[in-house]
Amino acid sequence: MSSSLRTSGLLTALAGLPGERIAVRTIVAALQDRAYALLVVLLGLPNCLPMPPPIPLVCGLVLAFVGLQMLTGRRMPWLPQALLARSIGKPELSRAVDRALPALTRLERFSKPRLTMLHGAYAVPVLGLVILILALGLIVAAPFIGQIPLGLAVCLVGLGLVERDGVFIIVGAAFGALGLLLSAGFAYAIFSGIHELFF
């Protein structure tokens, strides 16, 4: 898949892969060196809207797995064979892409290669740590709306990686800090309530 494609182009190309069903292995292979970046975007997208449990939890766990691999400097993401062998129906993939494209296209109007030092190969472990922290925030986020700032943060960081735009990465990190503060407040409220009930 061409390295010159933008995020919307990558998603459109994925939806256009041949076959009634598309294996996860095929998707990862098609993304080549941009697999990490688009995986991050795809895991962030469902959390940009109010979603019931366990969607944020599942996305957070998989995202943490991806972030850990980036942190260790792995060039391509490793996924279990059981997951690689799973497939996605072409209609479901096309529908998800169609829903995501309008927002991504609007964001791409503001995106261009900037602050390239933030998305070079040497920066991948640092970004892996950022994504791991955001993933942990997603795991403990308040149900339905608490994950939205973190979902936006993950998407912006992923878009920054795909588009080679350091400004998007910085803005995503800022959204992530806000989301983590909200998640920390939610966790504190729960623990305070438990403490008052039992102590």
Image (cartoon, rainbow, N blue to C red):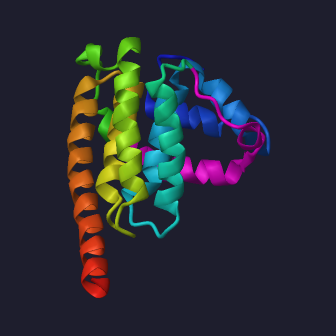
Instruction: Please tell me which residue is depicted at 52% across the width and 65% down the height of the picture.
Output: 54
**Residue toward you, 72 or 134:** 72
Q: For residue 179: magenta?
A: no
Instruction: Please tell me which residue is depicted at 41% across the width and 46% down the height of the picture.
Output: 135
Inspect this view and state whether residue 9 appears.
Answer: no
In-image side of 108 versus 14 (left or right): left
Where residue 188 appears, as percent x and y from the top left, is 24, 67
Q: Is residue 191 above or below residue 103?
A: below
In-image side of 80 versus 129 (left or right): right
State which quadrant residue 173 falls in.
Answer: top left
Q: Give the quarter of the figure containing the C terminus.
A: bottom left
Dominant SS in magenta = helix
Where residue 154 appears, as percent x and y from the top left, is 37, 43
Q: In this view, does 49 lie above or below 175?
A: below
Q: Give the quarter of the figure containing the N terminus.
A: top right
Instruction: Please tell me which residue is depicted at 51% across the width and 16% down the height of the picture.
Output: 3
> Over which residues does the magenta segment extend?
76-104
Inspect this view and state whether residue 158 appears.
Answer: yes
Q: For residue 82: magenta?
A: yes
Q: In this view, does 198 lie above or below 166?
A: below
Instruction: Please tell me which residue is depicted at 26% across the width and 32% down the height of the picture.
Output: 168
Where residue 139 appears, as percent x and y from the top left, is 43, 56
